[in-house]
Amino acid sequence: NTEYTLYSLEDGKTYYWYVVAKDDTGRASNSSLFSFNTPNIPQDKVFNYPNPFKKGQTTNIVFYSDVDGIAEIYICSLFGNVLFSDKTTVYKGSNTYQYDGSGLDFSGSYVVLVKVGDKTKKGKILLLNK
């Protein structure tokens, strides 16, 4: 397997990793040490990137959760009409939800609501149809 996903990483931290390769005889060899930094995600904000995004393009909705659980994602018109909704598993810390513009027919600004437990956070996204 060449891929591994980590959950519940802390914001604003440096993480280090290396790969251990094993051959058919059981001999192992370690790679060089690598590192990456996690960004500081505002805990009270919801944002997306790219923003604006185009119809058919995926945008990443980023938000912080205080707990492991289920997030309810709502995309609403500026008048409060729910145009899209979904649920996704989230982990304490920063989370990303990929959204493809489903339910949105016109260019413009939309409100994103993310509800986890009894807390709801809000952000805005901008869709371009051209």
Image: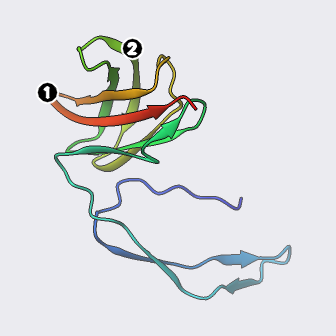
Q: Which residue is mark 2?
A: 83
Mark 2 crowdedness (10 Å alpha carbons): few <14, some 14-19, many ≥20: some
The disc label shown at residue 57, or none:
none
**Earlier along the polypeptide chain: callout 1 or callout 2?**
2
Residue closest to the far right: 24
Q: Quarter holding the C terminus? A: top right
Question: Disc 1, disc 2: CB below 8 Å?
Answer: no
Query: Looking at the image, which is closer to me, 34 or 54?
Result: 54
Q: How is the image coloured?
A: rainbow
Q: Quarter holding the N terminus? A: bottom right
Instruction: Give the residue type that dot 1 points to.
Output: Asp
Q: Nearer the viewer, mark 1 or mark 2?
A: 2
Query: Looking at the image, which is closer to me, 79 or 118?
Result: 79
Q: Is residue 126 above or below residue 51?
A: above
The disc label shown at residue 118, or none:
1
Residue closest to the far top: 81
Mark 1 crowdedness (10 Å alpha carbons): few <14, some 14-19, many ≥20: few
Image point (54%, 28%), residue name:
129
122 sits to left or right of 112: left
- Compute the Cα span from label 1 to label 2: 22 Å
Image point (21%, 45%), residue name:
45
Position in image of residue 100 (x %, y %): 54, 31
